Image (cartoon, rainbow, N blue to C red):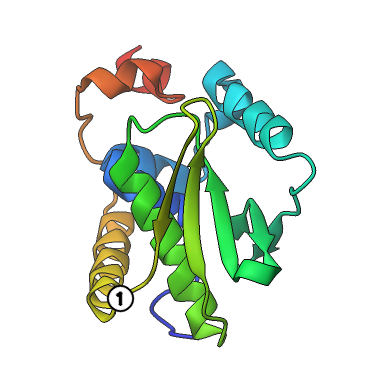
Amino acid sequence: MDKQSIFITATQINYFFVCKRKLWLFSHNITMEHNSELVELGNLLHQESYAKKRKEIEFDGIKIDFFEKNKALIHEVKKSKAIEKSHVWQIKYYLYRLKELGVEVEGEIDYPLQRKKEKFSLTDKDEKVILNIIAEIKLILKEPFAPQKIDQKICKKCSYYEFCYA
């Protein structure tokens, strides 16, 4: 395993694109997700949308929603495309970590409420981008204080909203 990716979770990759403050807080064990109705709704969507196919695979900070062995395809289920870039890099990180283990698969993001699916593979360029993302995350996490809040529209739906704006 690439020592640079050890201890970086897929959630951290996702949060890197959503909000650096959220990334820092989450990584320093300040978690608010358990208080969020939207997170709860997302979990329910995961459980109900693909109940028959649903067999989570979890390892080293990675939690894949389900895997279609016959298609060599991993799936990530998301509620909406609102923060699509973070979803894309999260699934590419899964592909990267699996490749480190000698497992080459493709990935698919499923948006059941929109009845859409998007397929992804991992390129050499993606791998370089992921290494840069990991390095940037490590720099952010070394900071003694959380980055400033971003004050964006998405903040109102964030599980950390009250923490940042109270």
Q: Residue at x 61, y 56 (%)?
A: 64
Work out which quarter of the rendered image holds the C terminus and state it: top left
Q: Residue at x 40, y 24 (%)?
A: 158
- Position of residue 78 relative to residue 87, above or below, is above
Along the viewing direction, whichever of 103 and 149 lies nearer the viewer: 103
Q: Residue furthest top?
A: 166
Q: Residue at x 39, y 47 (%)?
A: 87
- Position of residue 96 relative to residue 138, above or below, is below
Q: Does the rendering let one see residue 41?
A: yes
Q: Is residue 48 left or right of 8 when viewed as pictured?
A: right
Residue 144: x, y in percent? 29, 50
Along the viewing direction, whichever of 98 and 15 lies nearer the viewer: 98
Q: Residue at x 27, y 81 (%)?
A: 124
Q: Does the rendering let one see residue 145?
A: no
SS label for mark 1: loop
Q: Residue furthest right?
A: 52
Residue 103: x, y in percent? 57, 82
Q: Which residue is mark 1?
A: 123
Q: Residue 75 falls in which quadrant of the image? A: bottom right
Q: Residues within 10 Å of mark 1 (few under 14, many from 20)?
A: few
Q: Is residue 1 left or right of 50 when viewed as pictured?
A: left
Along the viewing direction, whichever of 57 and 4 lies nearer the viewer: 57
Residue 77: x, y in percent? 55, 42
What amino acid is found at the position of numbered circle 1 in the picture?
Thr
Along the viewing direction, whichever of 15 and 56 lies nearer the viewer: 56
